[in-house]
Image: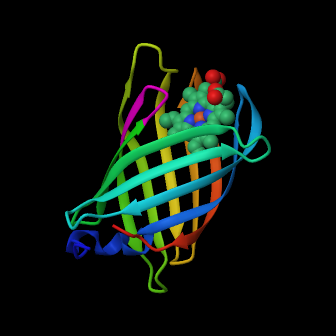
Amino acid sequence: MDPLHPACEPLNLLIGTWRGEGHGDYPTIDPFDYLEEVTFGHIGKPFLTYSQKTRHRDTNQPLHAEFGYWRPMTDGTLEVILAHPTGIAETIEGTLSLSENGKLLIKLTTTHIGLTATAKEVTQVARTITATPEILNYTLDMAAVDHPLQRHLEATLIKADEFQS
Ligand code: HEM
């Protein structure tokens, strides 16, 4: 395996596969619970690879998925680009910080959202992630379909596997 690029060192604890459960809601939809698997990997370059997939907790039906790249900068900022199967392309940027007890905090807000001709209207996304080597929690707020920024998702994931290149 290629050594981790030094720029990715602050995100080192994310690398591997995480599994867990989340809850979703929005004013226009029925609330739902979901199972999620997230994998962060690397190829020795100054970004992490990212993939995510979800299933409905009760029906096991596939729900949302995402692919992308996480690009940490040397000044503590973080750039993320994500592709969604719903016709949405998200560039989301913000900050990362590591507390003295080793907890990672990431706050991201969208800088651009690209929508295909038939995608639902999403105008803003805000993501907050906190992680230790064992537990990752996140929230995702969005402004969409004429509703202001508010909670769509929150989840707790557990580190399940180390990364294999
Ligand atoms: C864990 C990830 C996610 C899961 C499990 C999830 C799940 C769902 C579900 C079950 C619905 C309702 C049924 C449907 O329209 O398919 C929905 C609606 C929606 N989601 Fe998500 N979603 C996720 C992430 C996202 C993200 C990242 C965005 C935006 C970038 C997003 C935007 C939307 C929109 C715009 C709707 C439609 C609301 C409406 O039609 O009124 N979702 N989501």
The picture places residue 152, in percent across and down from the top left corner, at: 63, 40
For the residue pair 113 and 21, the one nearer the viewer reads as: 21
**What residue range appears in magenta?**
84-91
* 9 left or right of 25 in image: left
* 29 left or right of 135 in image: right
Residue in the image at 77% along x and 40% along y: 59
Q: Residue 2: which quarter of the image?
A: bottom left
Q: In this view, does 89 lie above or below 24?
A: above
Look at the image and tell me in which quarter the C terminus lies.
bottom left
Q: Is residue 79 above or below residue 121?
A: below
The picture places residue 147, in percent across and down from the top left corner, at: 61, 26
The picture places residue 51, in percent across and down from the top left corner, at: 44, 51
* 130 left or right of 116 in image: right
Q: Residue 107: which quarter of the image?
A: bottom left
Name the main secondary structure of what is drawn in magenta: strand
Image quadrant of ligand 1? top right
Residue in the image at 39% along x and 54% along y: 50
Visible residue check, residue 125: yes
The picture places residue 15, in percent across and down from the top left corner, at: 41, 69
Confirm whether the magenta stretch covers residue 89.
yes
Look at the image and tell me in which quarter the N terminus lies.
bottom left
Residue in the image at 36% along x and 63% along y: 41
Confirm whether the magenta stretch covers residue 30.
no
For the residue pair 85 and 132, the one nearer the viewer reads as: 85
Visible residue check, residue 149: no
